Amino acid sequence: MDSKPMPPDLNKSHEQNNQQLYVSSQTDPIISESTRSQRRGLSVSFADKTDVIVDETKQAITESMKALQSASKLGSIHEEYYGTPEDMGAESTALLKQYRERHRTKLGYARRNSYLEQSLGGASWVTGGFLLVSAALGAGILNYPVAYDRLGGIFTATVVQLGVLFILSTTMMILVYCSNINHDNSYHEVLYSICGSTVKNMAAVSILLSTFGICVTYYVIIGDQFDRIFATFYGSHFCYNWYLNRHFIIPVIGIGFIWPMCYFKNLEFLKHFNILGIIAMLYVVFLSVYEYAMLDKKPGDIKPVPDSAFAVLAAIPVVSLAYQTHELVVPVNACLKERTITNFSKSTGLALTLLFFLYCICGTFGYLTFGSTVSADIMQMYNAEDPIVVIGILALVVKMITTYPQIVLCGRDTFYRLLVPTQASLNLQNEANIPLPTKEFWHRISITTAWNVSALILAVLTPDITIAIGFLGAIGACNSFIFPGICMICLAKRQLKNSFNPQKVSMIALFIYGVFITTMGATMSTIVIIRAIYDLSTNSESIELCQL
């Protein structure tokens, strides 16, 4: 086959690049791409050469694949790759970049510790595991003893947790595997590259609803903590005083302390409060053991078996919500020194093991202390006259106040991407001669205000966190089961198109498992929503601290 002559423009660009390859770095400035390569720790000459190779190879492969595709000559070559010709060029580019990363100078290794670990990666698998633990520990732990009651006692709850952990670990691994195919760095990028824009937008809506539900839950938890304090020091009729009623307290805390922080463009000043959130959640675990040892209280009935299979299915998404970190597994994987399935599996194993240990302690001791009479929020069961309990209550309130704005920021950004998906849309909106920063400012103000008002109204109308967490579990099942299951199905279908694929049996098994995971997630979400609506209408598990 004769080689096709290089176009004049490309030939001219190629000659210019060749001239730049051997320019001394001490006399002339280095081109921008080479500067970036220097930061990565590469020698100047090798960096210059490989940067040119990467750019030209990507362009050449992409154009060649498009030409072959238009001439219908792709044949089996096209079946060995994923997606469009652009993806093929990107894959070859990624391979060259991996080769380039192996050729580091000694100076490069020193720079890696200072630059790469801060921006492009470099975290150990242990650090990755603790990042996942920090992301998973949240409001779900307060509701965990009730989940034990619904699951039918300690033994059944433990078995169900182990089953959920196995399924969650597989869905986390498939997301990481898919992210490594096209070197994606976010949950949305994985869904877009594997499943397409429709599934990506559906996931964005799911995450938007999840963040909104978390905000509602935080408001409800704040109201629960103040109810506990007021009931202890003002008696069971405290809510007769309008200024002590949760319908007044929640808006005051929200408008006075939380809302002002939500309107900032970034929340760097709150990053130091993240450790407080972890301590507050660990303190809840400590309190469950402490109160079990100190309280002289006869517990309610301890169930040996669950009431029904329906109750177990309804509780599974609540359990999985406590372990859910699927939105963060791809970014965490991207920041590791070794971006491999084996390395990330160590992080996942560490995180899930620690979480299982903590949740089992909280669920077991909380359930043994109160039995079937346990409250939806375990903190409501403790006596606030005990200073140790007061510390836990105050830590929870501060955690909710400082974490809420960060959740709003995440939800606002997701909503803004859905509202204004491209820079072209921004340019069209800017035709009214309104400066772009002003546009962004008013979008931020309007979205944040609507978000806060809606979340506050729903929180005031929600009697306890079981209902809020139930809806969160239904939405979380989409991110933990449904969308990873769809990724499995799409990945298997692409691989099965290649008739010479040696892993055909594995891909068939992956396809079947993906269908199972997706179906299970949809079924559980439906059941949880039905159960949450039932709880909202009956309010059967709510502990009324104020006797009206």
Image (cartoon, rainbow, N blue to C red):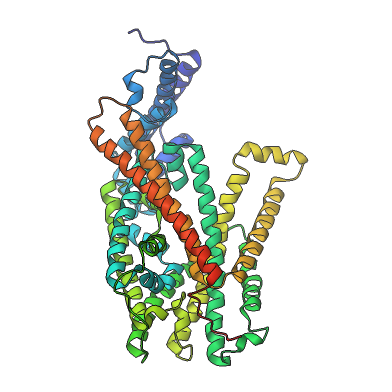
- The residue drawn where x is 47% and y is 63% is 531
Instruction: Identify whether 94 is placed above or below 434.
Output: above
Please give left or right for residue 407 compared with residue 381 in the image. Answer: right
Percent x, y of residue 106 = 29, 46
Residue 64's spot in the image, x, y percent? Answer: 41, 18
What residue is rendered at 34% in x and 46% in y?
516
The answer to whether residue 46 is visible is: no
* Quarter of the image where one finds residue 401: bottom right
Quadrant placement of the C terminus: bottom right
| Residue 158 visible in this rendered orientation of the protein | yes
Quadrant of the rendered image containing residue 152:
bottom left
- Residue 243 at x, y = what percent? 67, 83
* Image vertical order of residue 165 relative to residue 243, above or below: above
Give whichever of 5, 304 is nearer the camera.
304
| Above or below for 53 versus 240 | above
Along the viewing direction, whichever of 20 and 114 lies nearer the viewer: 114
The residue lying at 28 percent from left, 39 percent from top is 102
Q: Quadrant of the N terminus?
A: top left
Position of residue 325 in the picture relative to residue 155 (left or right) = right
